[in-house]
Image (tube, coloured by chain):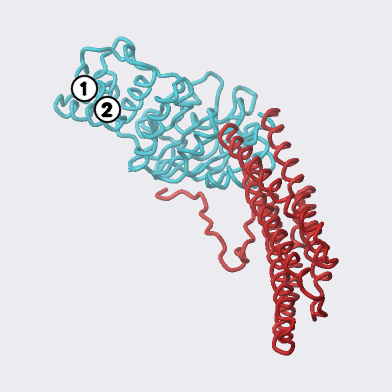
Chain colours: A red, B cyan
Amino acid sequence: MRTRFQQGLDELRTRLLRMGGMAEQAVDRACQAYIDRDLNRCHMVLEAESKINQAEREIDLLAFDLLAMQQPMAVDLRFILAVTKINSDLERVGDQAVNIAERVMDLVELPKADLPVDIARMAAAVSAMVRRALESFIEGKAELAQAVLEMDNVVDRMRDEAFINLVKTMNERPQITRQALDALLVARNLERVADHATNIAEDVIFWVRGADVRHNAQQENPPQEVTPRATGV
Amino acid sequence: MGVGIKVERLNAWFGNVQALHDISMEIAANHATAIIGPSGCGKSTFVRCLNRMHETIPEARASGKVRIGDLDIYNGTAAVQVRRRIGMVFQKPNPFPTMSIYDNVAAGLKLNGFRDRKRLGEIVERSLKLSALWDEVKDSLKKKSGASLSGGQQQRLCIARALAVEPEVLLMDEPCSALDPISTGKIEELIFQLKENFTIVIVTHNMQQASRVAEFTGFFLLGKLIEFDRTEKIFTTPSDKRTEDYITGRFG
């Protein structure tokens, strides 16, 4: 057993989970801020961003050290690669939370408007995706990650629906165009968070099974297998 | 040119102790194949069966089929004829200490009765160039003994000696384990170059080395071939849990 290496892997895992918690909380806060028009929560999201960015740099550095110093192989190599990619996705989740918070800060200046979009429902679906993607990482279970991939279509449909309804609203009630536009952007930000959760789930599957499921790769473009058979025998 | 090797149900024993169990694998021509596994797993025994060296140990025997190109090496073929086609390099460089560099390389050919001096000189030069040693020794070929060279140079001399008899296969049993990183780098670069003309089978304890030099890797454990696949597959997504545990350092 390589104790030092194992400690490094454990440390990487712990840090990524901590960062995942921060990113998940940032999205939840930003969504709640939208629902309650709560500036206080917006500021909390903005403050958390620098911590998430800092965590991203530390995780990358640790992963880089382990790659350079420990020459990881097989499942360990896949784990470290997955962590670096998940790390980057979580940082982007933090950015999307900030984007939502900035929309809310714009929105609170405007009169409240009744809009044909259920951001709370969409936020709940997206939060569940992020939570399950992180659970699949904690448990190292590809089945949990697979479930996240299937949820992405639901969120995509919600975003499409929001787009159609909000554009219609802008045409019919131009006086609330800004509120409708903010809601549209929030829906788009949430859909992006769902995409990052999907990426995380794909990385977990890569780590656990060694399978690349991105862009339906396995169905459309199976990697070429070269069997180690002799030639010229 | 190198030739492929086809091994079918190879078993080997030391007295009553079975060291290899039903090994079957096809080794690709003009590629490097690495054999990895913990100490005592049978990897050296395996390569020694490929050139009939295993049977030189008292009470050691082997059964099964090994075809080197079109040569069935366990079916009435003389061991000497097999070894002429299969060169071998060992863990510890073993040049003939009293012979000059030139004579070390020419030894195999001379032993086979080769007497054409001009041609011999050409072969020595070609072999030393192939083993990337020529530039370092060309001015002292007949003056210096093989033993006067550094460890890394001695190992390349041994490779030149093996290449001089123009084998089709080169077996290397941990060729770098006694060498420093610079010499190791040279030998690895050499393996890369030699693949063009030879089939290479390398036993190594160093997994990074296997991943650097070999296109295919076989993992041995307790005398059995557990997994044999493309090297990148073995080191990124091995199919067998035992392979994964070994290469990730969880045992071995």
Q: Could you say which quadrant of the image residue B181 lies in? A: top left
A194 relative position to B116: left or right: right
The reply to whether dot 1 and dot 2 touch (C-beta < 8 Å) is: yes
Q: Could you say which quadrant of the image residue B20 lies in? A: top right
Residue A87: x, y in percent?
66, 49
Secondary structure of the residue carrying tag 2 is helix
Name, please, the residue furthest toward the top: B98
B229 relative position to B28: left or right: right
Residue A110: x, y in percent?
77, 73
Q: Is residue A172 above or below residue B99?
A: below
Q: Nearer the viewer, residue A218 or B40?
A: A218
Q: Amino acid at mark 1?
A: Lys
Q: Nearer the viewer, residue B110 or A63?
A: A63
Name, please, the residue furthest toward the right: A36
* Chain to which mark 1 belongs: B
Crowding near the residue tagged with mark 1, few <14, some 14–19, many ≥20 C-alpha atoms within 10 Å? some
Q: Which mark is residue B128?
A: 2
Q: Tag 2 or tag 1, which sits nearer the N-term?
A: 2
Residue B52: x, y in percent?
46, 29
Q: Is residue A101 above or below residue B173?
A: below
* Residue found at x 73% / y 90%: A172
Q: Amino acid at mark 2?
A: Leu
Q: Could you say which quadrant of the image residue A32 lies in? A: bottom right
Q: Nearer the viewer, residue A219 or A24?
A: A24
Asked if badges 1 and 2 are on one and the same chain, I answer yes
Residue indicated by mark 1:
B138
Dividing the image into 4 quarters, which one contains the N terminus of chain A? top right
Secondary structure of the residue carrying tag 1 is loop
* Chain to which mark 2 belongs: B
